[in-house]
Amino acid sequence: MQYEAVIGLEVHAQLLTESKIFCGCSTQFGAEPNTQVCPVCLGMPGVLPVLNKKAVEYTVKTGLAMNCKIAPYSRFARKNYFYPDLPKGYQISQYELPLCEDGYLEIMLNGTKRKIRIKRIHLEEDAGKNIHDPSGYSFVDFNRTGVPLMEIVSEPDIRSPKEAALYMKKLRAILRYLGVCDGNLEQGSLRCDANVSVRPVGSTEFGVKTEIKNINSFRFVEKALEYEIKRQIKLIENGEKIIQETRLWDSQTGTTQSMRSKEEAHDYRYFPEPDLVPVVVSEDWIEKIKKDMPELPDQKIERFIKEYGLPQYDSEILTEEKALSEWFEEAVKLGGKPKEVANWIMVELLRLLNEEGKDINECSLKPIQLVELIELINKGTINRNTAKEVFEEMYKTGKTAEAIVREKGLTQISDDSVIIEAIKEVMNKNPKEVERFRNGEEKLIGFFVGQVMKITKGKANPKLVNELIFKILKE
Amino acid sequence: MELNKLKLTELVPLISKGEVRPHEIIIDVFKRVQEVEGKVKAYITLTVEKAYDMAREAENAIFSGKKSLLTGIPIAVKDNICTKGILTTCASKILYNFYPPYESTVTSKLLNNKYILIGKTNMDEFAMGSSTENSGFHVTKNPWDLERVPGGSSGGSAAAVAADECIAALGSDTGGSIRQPASFCGVVGLKPTYGRVSRFGLVAFASSLDQIGPITKCVADAALLMNVISGHDPMDSTSAPIESSDFTEYLGKEVKGIKIGIPKEYFIEGMDKEVEERIKDAIKELESLGCIPVEISLPHTEYAVATYYIIATSEASSNLARYDGVKYGLRVQGKDLLEMYMKTRSRGFGTEVKRRIMLGTYSLSAGYYEAYYKKAQQVRTLIKNDFEKAFEKVDFIVTPTAPSPAFKIGEKIDDPLQMYLSDIFTISVNLAGVPAISIPCGFSEKGLPVGLQIIGKPFDEAGILQLAYAYEQSTPWHKMKPLL
């Protein structure tokens, strides 16, 4: 039997506000434990939360970018459970009346658009971190407690791990474009839980679902889901039952492991937070936020196609990261031909970044350097192959293309006499091939060009070499 | 002259004129404390040394011409109001060692006035109770009869004021916790409109009901204290964004033509005869002052106690979750996390607190939420509407504060339902969020004080104080002192 997966994602995104959601403490990542805390985020007796307006604004912004309805009136609620990293014994979250509802995101799969509906986006506070020491003691770091967290819940519209990955990519791109979240799964500023079930293709009923937690890297979104779907299908085919439960993704073993079943599930006893008044988002405020909205990935893709004549594929890759799209546009503005610049970015720049596991924000190479490099090619100073070498050198050292070409003596040889000499040397060493060539085996041209390039250490102008070989050998 | 026996309004001009120095007042206060505190046991913590330091600061302020309204006035503060660096226990063993690193907004305001803190007063644990018998430390006695309770939960504050162990006090009122002990101890207690006084630093019992207010020897004292403690606070999102008026503004103004509503649901079969008589006398007195009594109905009154005990306990079950032994207060070690939680909370909380946590947890549980918490919120709206409708017809509502005078220690402690019913006349006011005062209106045959409750429209504390003052000035009750 053929099965299809039904997947819904719950994404938590830490907001890039300067201060926490209900107090003035800093949200900076990586500080010494318990140095960014105060009585309010520590949940001491008698203290009260005061809502950070910026966090609401960021959530509304996200809601608008994801085509949601913004609630004119929403409420915070308490989610009650005991855990040492939760100092009040409850998390201030939203339950019945979230800030944003009924939106969607579009993803491109094999050239077709797929709409993934978004059920809700709500605002809540992050918990702290428990640290278990080998000594047997446990410690709690409350620095993260109260960092504003946005929960983005999709409808179960995702049908494959590939789609889930594309959805996550699109979502992350939007968050980063908006500047509301840095989208770092490894550091936990973006977290993804997945609800997965499988059913026979054609069925409209849902199967029993499991929730996968701890997917802490982009690479694992697909892997974890693929594993879980296979696991579920195998259970069904063996006539076994799927248990509704929470499962943890283990990247070491590449499997998911049972964490707790529904019977052990929490009763969170949600109720409206009496310490906060309802959040009122006025039309005026929404309009103001709309005016402030940056160009989003989908709009940018369209513009790149129209304005620069780029293919869809190129536009998608260039717009995945806002900074990358800006890098590209800067290079074009400085005189680079759009398609040429796009090729350099997609083939060389992204390869180098990937090798180091860096992203464009950590890249020291400047657009002007690429444009200068392209100019050297166009002027015939260096050839395309040499240019790749120069590009890599620029990327690593930050030097200009010209300086590298000068230092390494990479200037292209366009002097006929030097090339003719090299051709003659090759002819002397390979009389048989010369013979064959002269007898009409013209595909040997490649062999001769290669030999000449070898002698000239790749610096010879390939076009010239080609011409001269024909000219001399045909004499 | 024993300065501790004076009222706030009497001391303020004496200090202003330089006739009395703050440290003279606290000498008298602490002398009195030494004499009677062994019997009354109003305080959990006496801040003697601190008080002398504060008196010195007050005197410096006066000397340098920087005197404020309450400069040099000794005030007692209920032990659920956080005072920086001073033990704040909520009368709970779970906070037996808690020294807040922050100051509540109300005490910050008092500090800005250079008041003198005398001590932190006893209460029912986490303000849950109506007799102060639920204190995790000791029972406070009613100064009028040491075998009786002072009421609760602000029993320590009311007893300290009645026994002249301070000049005035702060209490907190969630379902009657200022008014009922004021009634039992023969003093004045005002529960302001919800949102009038900041809750920042008040250890939460039921967040949507809690409100801090004054407990004083007379109505004018309450108005004066209100002038200092009320007002919008950016640290409390539920504090009303309106600036406070002068609460003494209408004191002494005549009350002729004021319509006072008498809710028929508050005069029921089986209520204490003596209380009923005192209240009826008080209404006659108000009539003689020109007030017009109007019979009104607050039809949902009978549901108030049930509604209250669902909402208050639900909020409490959540508010008290933070006392888990992890961060501050009591920790009883266990073999694992769960055992630490259970042992800490088992030993740290008293019976009544545990009972309410369980009630509230139950009301909020999946499957019961709709039937209990949600329903209670709906009834709360109906109760609120009752008051809104009534206030279309009348200016104030007059009722007994409590169904009986102070009862005996131990009398109701094993019968929670009877105990809960002692708040039957005060609870609706918290549910509706409106302000109300309790003022002395006579004594029972056994010489126990009876309290009259005046309920006003939202934010009409000044009006309530005006009417209460008019009544007080035409009756002798506030001049009576217990013999100790």
Image (cartoon, coloured by chain):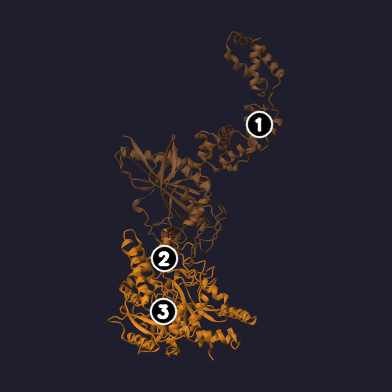
Chain colours: A brown, B orange
Name the kind of residue labelled 3 in the image: Arg
- State left or right for residue B249 relative to residue A370: left
- A194, above or below B376, in the image: above
Residue A252 visible in the snapshot: no
Chain at tag 1: A
Disc marking residue B179: 3
Residue B52 visible in the snapshot: yes
Q: Nearer the viewer, mark 1 or mark 2?
A: 1
Q: Position of residue A50 (x, y in %)?
A: 50, 62
Residue B333 in which image quadrant: bottom left
- Dot 3, how many residues are within 10 Å of its Cα: few (below 14), some (14-19), or many (20+)? many
Label 2 residue SS: helix
Residue designated by label 2: B345
Chain at tag 2: B
Name the kind of residue labelled 2 in the image: Arg
Q: Nearer the viewer, mark 2 or mark 3?
A: 3
Pick the residue in front: A205 or A375.
Answer: A375
Q: Position of residue A300 (x, y in %)?
A: 52, 41
Pick the residue in front: A221 or A471.
Answer: A471
| Pointers 1 and 2 within a single chain | no
Residue designated by label 1: A375
Q: Nearer the viewer, mark 1 or mark 3?
A: 1
Label 2–label 3 contact, CB within 8 A: no
Q: Position of residue B408 (x, y in %)?
A: 36, 82
- A340, above or below B173, in the image: above
How far apart are the alpha carbons under marks 1 and 3? Answer: 87 Å
| Pointers 1 and 3 within a single chain | no
- A316, above or below B181, in the image: above
Chain at tag 3: B
Label 1 residue SS: helix
